[in-house]
Image: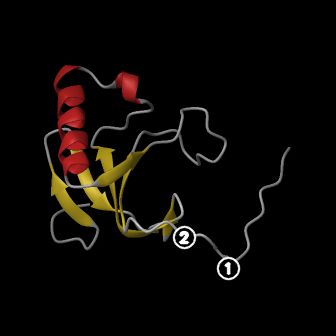
Amino acid sequence: MKEGHPQFVRQERYFKVIRNRTPYSLWDEQVVLDHLMIVPIKHTAKVSDLGGEAAEEYVRLLGEYDERGYCMFARALNASVRSVVHQHTHLMKLDGKKRRFLFMVRKPWYFRLSR
């Protein structure tokens, strides 16, 4: 994904920041106003695989978006909902208004069958 693509936000030396193709609408009972992801340019399975300069760039990006009010989330390496083992970090800016009641309908319905 390159500059000019609708999902592209920015590129650093080791990471890209992109808009999530299927953004969450709610997180922590709040409306998600913006949903980005920090994605390593080189395929990386886990954060601990990042070395030296890449790790420094990652922490700098996290800090920058933290200062802008984004929440951060990354799934564990062995999370059952991961489709492909790769590292990326979700950045979500929330509206700050916690909902007391949520009614959610999800279409199409997805079912995960255990083997």
Residue 55 place in picture, x, y as percent = 24, 27
Q: Secondary structure at mark 2?
A: loop
Residue at left offset 61%, top offset 32%: 78
Left or right: 71 as drawn, with respect to 1: right
* Mark 2 residue crowding within 10 angstroms, few (<14) / some (14–19) / many (20+): few
Residue 11 place in picture, x, y as percent = 16, 51
Instruction: Indicate the amino acid at tag 1.
Output: Lys
Reading the image, the residue beneath label 2 is 99
Reading the image, the residue beneath label 1 is 107
- Tag 2 or tag 1, which sits nearer the N-term? 2
Against 70, residue 20 (above or below) is below
Q: Is residue 48 or residue 26 the one in the foreground?
A: 26
Q: CA distance from mark 1 to mark 2?
A: 22 Å
Residue 60 place in picture, x, y as percent = 17, 36
Residue at left offset 21%, top offset 29%: 54
Give the quarter of the image for residue 31: bottom left
Instruction: Indicate the amino acid at tag 2.
Output: Arg
Q: Secondary structure at mark 1?
A: loop
Q: Which mark is residue 80?
A: none
Against 82, residue 50 (above or below) is above
User: Disc 1 vs disc 2: which is toward the camera?
Assistant: 2
